[in-house]
Image: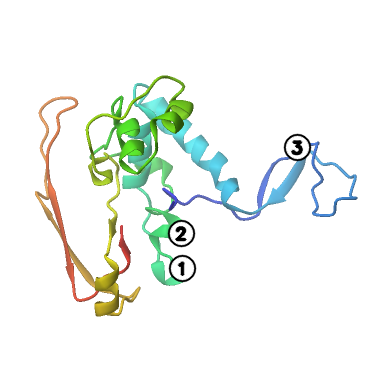
Amino acid sequence: MQPDRNAPSGDILAAYSPVASHSTTTTDRRRVKYNIISGTSMSCPHVTGVVAYVKTFQPHWSPSAIRSALLTTAFPMDPSNNPDGEFAYGSGHVNPVKAIDYGLVYDTVKGDNIRFLCSIGYVEGTIRIVTGHNSSCPEKTLPRDYTYPTLTAAIPQYLLKLQHISYNSKLEIKVVSQVLSFKSLMEKKPYNVTVTGKTLKPFLM
């Protein structure tokens, strides 16, 4: 699964477990309290700190609402530096200051996550292990109906062969309505997104 967002993860100085060696040599008995590490997992504490920061401004927000604010306000990144594009860095680089100056928030309500897991093929037994209670799959739903602050579309294989897919495809995206006006808390508004272009990637986000 693609990441949601990008955060600092290179040469990060962080606390380190005294149980493990700081090197890859199994015979190394040295232990350290801190270590400089790079990798995807090192971005996690940065995002956690940003979440705590946003929570101070919006103490009643759900985790999904905070996630939405982080995704929709992230700095755009240059896809030419990474051919995997959004599947490598998500919606962009996390922006703590902008996250508290959010626009539209995509929130989930109780049951949304269960319906999503059901829609992508998880059986009820597995879902109950995840949720910790006797959850059951409701009526048939589609993954695309899950409230999430990104849009993803899979392109059928026959279209890939016909269109000679390229990561440099130029797409035109049209959103209607471009402005949504809300009059009350938790009010919902619909909008349509249309994507057109001569060539399409295997996935669109």
Residue 17: which numbered mark, if any? 3
Q: Position of residue 34 (x, y in %)?
A: 75, 42
Residue at point 36% right, 42% down?
A: 121
Real-space Cα distance between discs 3 and 2?
Answer: 28 Å
Q: Residues within 10 Å of mark 2 (few under 14, many from 20)?
A: some
Is residue 100 at all visible to an observer of this figure? no
**Image disc number at residue 123:** none
Separation of marks 1 and 2 at Cα, in angstroms: 7 Å
| Precedes in sequence: disc 1 or disc 2 | 1
Measured along the vertical axis of the image, is residue 21 above or below residue 199?
Answer: above
Identify the residue position indicated by label 1 in the image.
Answer: 82
Identify the amino acid type marked 2. Answer: Ala
The numbered mark, 1 or 3, whose residue comes first in the sequence reads: 3
Q: Amino acid at mark 1?
A: Asn
CB-based contact (under 8 Å), mark 1 and mark 2: yes
118 left or right of 44 in image: left
Compare residues 20 and 69 and report the one nearer the observer. 20
Where is residue 85 shown, x and y percent of the image?
40, 64
Q: Amino acid at mark 3?
A: Ser
What residue is shown at x 73% (from left), y 40% (from top)? Answer: 16
Tell me the SS state at disc 1: loop
What residue is disc 2 on? 88
